[in-house]
Amino acid sequence: EAGVTQFPSHSVIEKGQTVTLRCDPISGHDNLYWYRRVMGKEIKFLLHFVKESKQDESGMPNNRFLAERTGGTYSTLKVQPAELEDSGVYFCASSHPGTSGYNEQFFGPGTRLTVL
Amino acid sequence: AQKITQTQPGMFVQEKEAVTLDCTYDTSDPSYGLFWYKQPSSGEMIFLIYQGSYDQQNATEGRYSLNFQKARKSANLVISASQLGDSAMYFCAMREGGGGTSYGKLTFGQGTILTVHP
C-alpha cells in the first residue's frame, strides 16, 4: 500500500510568487491534514479535511493560504503571494478508521518551501 | 500556552542502552490521546506509539514503551536497547477530545534529537 505522497519535495520561489503544494493521501483515507514546521519551531496544524469538506481550518495563518480537496482525494495548498515567513516544511497526513483504534495520522515526507 | 513540552533539545545514548525522552502536556479535556513520532533524516514522520488518557496500562510497542504519569501530565518515551537506526528527531503530540475515536488535529512538541553512539 502506497503511503502519503507530497509534491514537490522542495520548492524555492521568490517573495510575491505563487506556489501550489500537492498531497496524495493513502487511498481510502477520508481525513487529510496539513501541518507546517517553520525553522526552529514546533510543527503546527493548518487544517483538516473530511473528504472534500473543511472540518477545521483554525490553523490557517491568513487568506494568502488556500487549501482544496476536490472530490475528496488529493489536496492542494496554494500560497499566494508567498512571503518570507512562509518558508518551512509543509507536511500532509491522512487517517481513517482502522484496526488499531488509535486513528493515528500517517504523514508524508513533507515539502520544503523556501521563499527568497 | 504551550500544550506539549519537550525539554530536551538533544539526547545522546550508547548503543544497546536505554534512553528516556521527556514529554509533558497540558489539557483540560479529560479525553485525549498522546502520540510519539520518529522523524529520521529522510524526513518522513513515523508513528511509534499511542497512549489514551483512559488507558490503565502503559503502552508498549516492541522496544518502545510509554511511561504515562497522568497526575503529573507526563508521557515519556522509553527506548530500550538503542540501535544506531534510532538516531532521529522524536516528536511528542497530543490529540484532544474523543481519545481513540477522535480524528482531530495533533498538537506537537518542539522535538528531541536523539543520537545513538556505537
Image: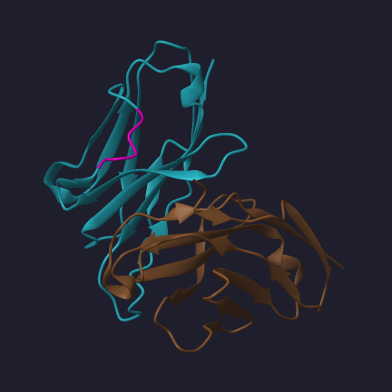
Q: Position of residue B59 (x, y in %)?
A: 52, 83
Magenta-drawn segment = A57-61
Residue at 58% x, 71% y is B72
User: How would you classify the magenta stretch by its main secondary structure?
Assistant: loop
Q: Position of residue B51 (x, y in %)?
A: 46, 76
User: The C terminus of chain A lies in which quarter of the figure?
Assistant: top right
Q: Chain A rendered in what hue?
A: cyan
Residue B64 is inside the magenta segment? no
Residue B13 lies left or right of residue B91; in this view the side is right
Q: Residue at x 60, y 80 (%)?
A: B65
Lateral position of residue A97 relative to residue B11, left or right: left
Image chain in brown = B
Q: Position of residue A23 (x, y in %)?
A: 33, 44
Residue at x 38%, y 67% (from the top left corner): A104
Horizontally, residue A71 falls left or right of residue B13, namely left
Is B59 rendered above or below residue B93?
A: below
**Nearer to the camera, A89 or B4:** B4
Q: Residue at x 31, y 21 (%)?
A: A64
Nearer to the camera, A94 or A64: A64
Q: Residue furthest top?
A: A16
The quarter of the image holding the N terminus of chain A is bottom left
Using the rendered view, name the quadrant where residue A77 is placed: top left
